[in-house]
Image (tube, helix red, strand yellow):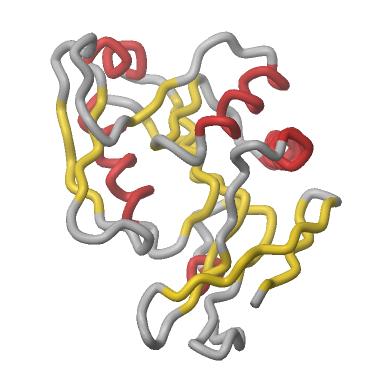
Amino acid sequence: MTYTLNVAGLTRELTLSPVNENLTIAGFVIFGDVELTCACAGALLKKAPEFDYMLAPEAKAIPLIHEMARQSGRNEYFLVRKKAKAYMRDVFRVEDHSITTEGTQYLYMDGVDAKKMKGKRILILDDVISTGGSIAAVEELVREAGGIVAGRMAILAEGDAAKRDDIIFLEHLPLFNAKGEPIA
């Protein structure tokens, strides 16, 4: 089963994948799709509020934030990591609960990046916002770093996330039942 998505002037067929016996999601992956990544980055930049830096959680949002930085002429952006790396200093973390990741995961921020964000307007990016758990965790890291959340953006708002007025997104992505019928 697939779902036809139209976003940023492009059409893609997304494979439907069961999460559990009652819930199926459409798999949206921009990895390897340069045309889609570039088109979505440009469309999001047209809607973006003013910001000083962009920040995204790894991993699927990495090509998006990179392309948005390139198109906007910015030379620096920040990533929130799923594991602390040896080169990171003064690391801090928050819990994250995601619809696509089983159990609790943690998000980590490098203290060097955090110092640069202090007092700055931070635009938080992701590929898809569903429950909002990852975005909330990233926001907590921004606040701990002393940054100001300038906005929250995603290519897609999945399910009820499309009803939120605090997220800027390009298209709604429904959730599906086990038969592949849209439910939200």
The one nearer the camera, 5 or 145, is 5
The one nearer the camera, 88 or 34, is 34
Quarter placement of the C terminus: bottom right
- Residue at the location (76% across, 55% down)? 7
Q: In the displayed structure, does residue 48 sit left or right of residue 123?
A: right
Q: Position of residue 53 (x, y in %)?
A: 49, 21
Q: Quadrant of residue 109?
A: top left
The one nearer the camera, 17 or 35, is 17
The one nearer the camera, 113 or 3, is 3
Q: Position of residue 148 (x, y in %)?
A: 37, 31
Q: Quadrant of residue 182?
A: bottom right
Against 156, residue 162 (above or below) is below
Q: Position of residue 179 (x, y in %)?
A: 56, 90
- Residue at the location (26% across, 10% down)? 112
Outermost residue to the front: 1
Quarter placement of the N terminus: bottom right
- Residue at the location (75% across, 69% down)? 4
Against 87, residue 65 (above or below) is below
Q: In the displayed structure, does residue 167 sit left or right of residue 45?
A: left
Q: Position of residue 55 (x, y in %)?
A: 44, 29
- Residue at the location (39% across, 26% down)? 79
